[in-house]
Image: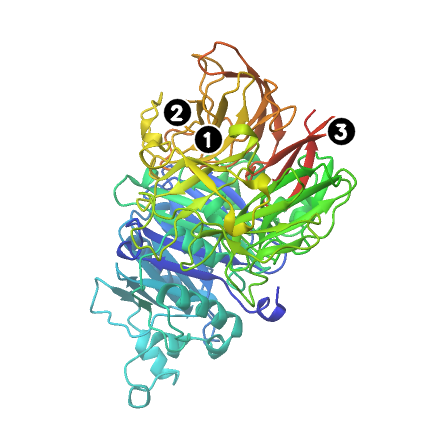
Amino acid sequence: MSNLFLVTLLSFGIIAGSKATTDGYVYLGHNEDIRGDKMLNIYNVPGSKDGLAGLWFEFPGRIGDSYVNGHGVCIVSEKSPSREKDSGGTSLYKAQTKAFRHAKSAREAVRIIGSEVSRHGSSESGRTYLIADSKEGWVLSIAKGRIWVAQRVPDDEIMVISGRFNIQETNLKDTANFMGSKRLVRKAMRKRWYNPQRDGAFNFAKAYSNPATLTDMGNAEAFAKARDLFFKDSLSLSDAPFSSKPVKKFHRRDLSGLLSEVPVNNENTALTTIFTLNPDYPAEKGTVIWVGFPGQDAANHNQWTIFTKSPESCHRYADASMALKKHFLDTGSFRERWPSHFYWHYLYPETNIDVIPHDYTVYIPQSQRGGHDSFNDHFHVLVDEKRGLLHAFWTQGSHEAADDEKVVHASSSDGGKTWTDPVMVAGSPSIEAPEPVAAWQQPMISRSGRLYCLWNQETTVKKHLSGLMFGRYSDDGGKTWSKPEQVPFPVRFKADPEDPSIPPTWCMWQRPLRLGEDGRYIAGCSRYGTDGISRVEFWQYDNIDDDPQIKDIQISFFNTDEDSFDAAQVVNDHDYSPRDGRKVEEACLVGLPDGRLFAVMRTTIGHPIWSVSTDNGKTWSRPEILRMRDDGEPILQPCSPCPIYDCNGPEARSGEYFLMTHNTFDFNGLTAYQNRGPVYKLGGEFVPGAHQPVWFKDAGLFSPRDSGNSLYTSYTFFDGKGILWFGDQKYYLFGKMMR
């Protein structure tokens, strides 16, 4: 990570109107940057005579807290230094908490804070609040003293702010779109910051900003990334308008990717929040907060609603009222005084290595979270019996869907005790010199010992999971590789875009296993339609054992189009309709002793589902909810990986299995992408003659982490040892003996 930006960026924020997003929601995205000693607490504030209930992200001793109340009013802020040096007023903290507790709309929150500033003034050099509800978003900027101005973000535009004021021409007579101090222009003229003859129309940002913020390199670089992503231009901080229409509507994943990139995200970034505000639901259901702790991509980890219960490990004090009273007291030495607090897991990952007990260490990132090698996912290990090697493949980058995503390979010659340094097989080497990314690899070994690695390759469209299949092979155990070539496979299934120049969107997360016809490799594929709904099909690699060239690899496609698994087909015990749509993804396969295949898949309906095939994966039974046993309790699961493995080896068909699951789900939640908390291991046993052929029991805790568990894993069995290879928080890569 370059040091150029570490001492300059003062936080970063975006508001998007409902007509600028793909789902029609108002978005508020924000990175809070804090230097020095810091601690994040998350409190559920109860409703009372003193104010509304809500969720409070608190940094003790700081002003930069984030809030969302029971009416779906979201408030974040960032420093925006002004040129005012005269004495000011009181702290803004009272004003922002008053708005949090009492505002029933974003507009009312602006009025509350503005009124407090007009009455009491502000002692801070400058601060900008980003305030939104499901109908509109506002930017409220305050200069030291009693000066403030607010502007509404147009519904079809996006506002970007990076460490400086950005409200420009103002019209306080237009009360639908502006509010502010009556002294706004008069004071600027008195201070000689604004001269109508010299400057033309009054521009708040130019008049009141600290001039250093206009030329700050960190702010400028972050702003340029956003301009390129949303508007495809290179307008500077000084030249860009308050807000602009995007070249196309965007999704929260696009926003999360931006908020994860350097320098928008840097070593001082203490919290990432993305508030998605759905106008079609009441606030308690329509407001979803996507949270990224240091080093996390917010769109893929922690999803909160207004009333999500905050774990005890997230609290400095037992209740919110005490925290409100002591916000500016007992600050400092946080880590020493509250050593078991959850935040240290993310702020100091090097101290967090042993939370999940493990027996093998494959990779420890060289960089802190957000660095070039801090994202490590889709971790596949397979046994090379001919050479006595273990091969590890994974997708690596600075974050998920980053411009430096790549497929890497490492090997071990001593049974997993030590590993070679990873070498890039395909993809983009760095953020600074990006090339087309590669991800979601599928490694296989032919019977002669040829090592294949296939992957999803970015081609004509830069979009997560969108691409064609490419591959390489090695005849010397991964020391050298063939030239990358495309694997031919049909692009035009019904789920795919009609435009032949646009590649399909697909992902294979489980490595192919020899469970297909005559021992051929087969794996499940998540295929994403133009409607945004994912379904599961199966791909069989027909001629890997013939050692073909990459361009000659043959694939059979099963369970496609109308036959692909669709969550809408599943009979659910709950009448649950997720905002995300009914999706099925990420099939994991095991073989049954009677010759059938058993597949378990994650969904957005609150449960994993299962299906069986009697013909080596060509056709499948109608999918059903996964239960502990026939007519037993359904297994609960958010939209998160739920792998199943044969205890005696991935292809053993032994009848003994284990399943990884969170075993929790909130059916009152609007989204199925819920917190990926503790993970449990359930023992499974084949039951001849049963309807659901595998029954489960004996749940044991595998990972005690309170969030961030995402088990894209693999399993090997050799030398009498069954080892689960897993990525811990998509950061460390470990192995754990399971039997």
Looking at the image, the residue that sits furthest to the bottom is 197
Query: Relative to residue 199, is residue 153 depicted above or below?
Result: above
Query: How many badges with numbers are in the image?
Result: 3
List the residue tagged with mark 1.
601
**Depth check, front residue: 100 or 495:** 495
Q: Is residue 729 visible?
A: no
Residue sitting at x 26%, y 51%: 135
Q: Position of residue 138 (x, y in %)?
A: 32, 59
Query: Relative to residue 220, is residue 706 depicted above or below?
Result: above
Q: Confirm or deny contact between disc 1 and disc 2 (CB under 8 A).
A: yes
Q: Position of residue 254 (x, y in %)?
A: 41, 55
The image quadrant where one finds the C terminus is: top right
Left or right side of 182 for 457: right
**Depth check, front residue: 708 or 197:** 708
Which numbered disc flags the more N-terminal residue, 2 or 3?
2
Which numbered disc flags the more N-terminal residue, 1 or 3?
1
**Depth check, front residue: 385 or 187:** 385
Of the numbered discs in the image, which one, if any, rests on residue 271? Answer: none
Looking at the image, the residue that sits furthest to the top is 689
Left or right side of 30 for 448: right
Which numbered disc flags the more N-terminal residue, 1 or 2?
1
List the residue tagged with mark 2.
623
Count neighbours of disc 2 (C-alpha within 10 A) and say few if under 14, some if 14 to 19, many if 20 or more: many
Q: Is residue 532 visible?
A: yes
Count neighbours of disc 1 (C-alpha within 10 A) and say few if under 14, some if 14 to 19, many if 20 or more: many
User: Given the image, on which type of amino acid does mark 2 rest?
Assistant: Pro
Of the numbered discs in the image, which one, if any, rests on residue 719? Answer: 3
Marks 1 and 2 sit apart, C-alpha to C-alpha, by 9 Å
